[in-house]
Amino acid sequence: MLSLAPALANPPAMFIADEPTLGLSPLASVAVLDALRELRDRGSAVLLVAEKAHEVMSLADELVFMELGRVVWAGARADANAEQLAAAYLGITS
């Protein structure tokens, strides 16, 4: 949370975070995601890299799922199909 304090005090045009909740307790993860949501709501573009997609999907307007450096799905959050994304994430082809 301390590393997010400067961004919350003076929101940047863009905030980039790689695995912002990695290794945190569930309660701390919620606090970090709430802080990122506040940044977004205050006008910052927020770019997140997260292995646990379900944790950050509620923050997203756009989603990009990658596998081994290749985009396997990209689109609006509203267009995301949970089964399709799970299949892409798990490497299942139809």
Image (cartoon, rainbow, N blue to C red):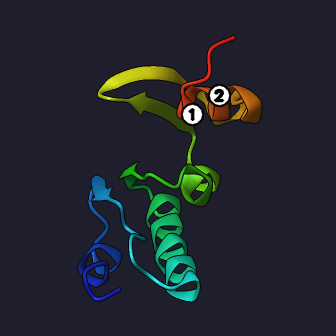
Q: Position of 15 compared to 73: left or right?
A: left
Q: What residue appears at the point 55 percent right and 50 percent down from the top-left corner? A: 53
Q: Residue 75 location, x and y as percent?
A: 57, 24
Q: Position of 21 compared to 74: left or right?
A: left
Whether tag 2 and tag 1 are in contact, CB under 8 A, the answer is: yes
In which quadrant of the rendered view does residue 66 lie?
A: top left
Quick one: quadrant of the N terminus? bottom left
The type of residue carrying mark 2 is: Ala
Q: Residue 73 location, x and y as percent?
A: 53, 22
Task: Kindly report the distance in space between the C-alpha atoms of the residues bearing marks 2 and 1.
Answer: 5 Å
Which is nearer the eye, 41 or 67? 67
Quick one: quadrant of the C terminus? top right
Q: What residue appears at the point 53 percent right and 61 percent down from the top-left corner? A: 41
Q: Residue 52 location, x and y as percent?
A: 52, 55
What is the secondary structure assignment of the residue under circle 2?
helix
What is the secondary structure assignment of the residue under circle 1?
helix
In which quadrant of the rendered view does residue 8 lie?
A: bottom left
In which quadrant of the rendered view does residue 22 lie?
A: bottom left
* Neighbourhood count class around disc 1 (C-alpha, 10 Å): few under 14, some 14–19, many 20 upward: few
| Residue assigned mark 2 | 87
Q: Count the marks: how many?
A: 2
| Residue assigned mark 1 | 90
Q: Residue 90 location, x and y as percent?
A: 57, 34
The type of residue carrying mark 1 is: Leu
Residue 93 sits above or below residue 58 on the image: above
* Neighbourhood count class around disc 2 (C-alpha, 10 Å): few under 14, some 14–19, many 20 upward: few
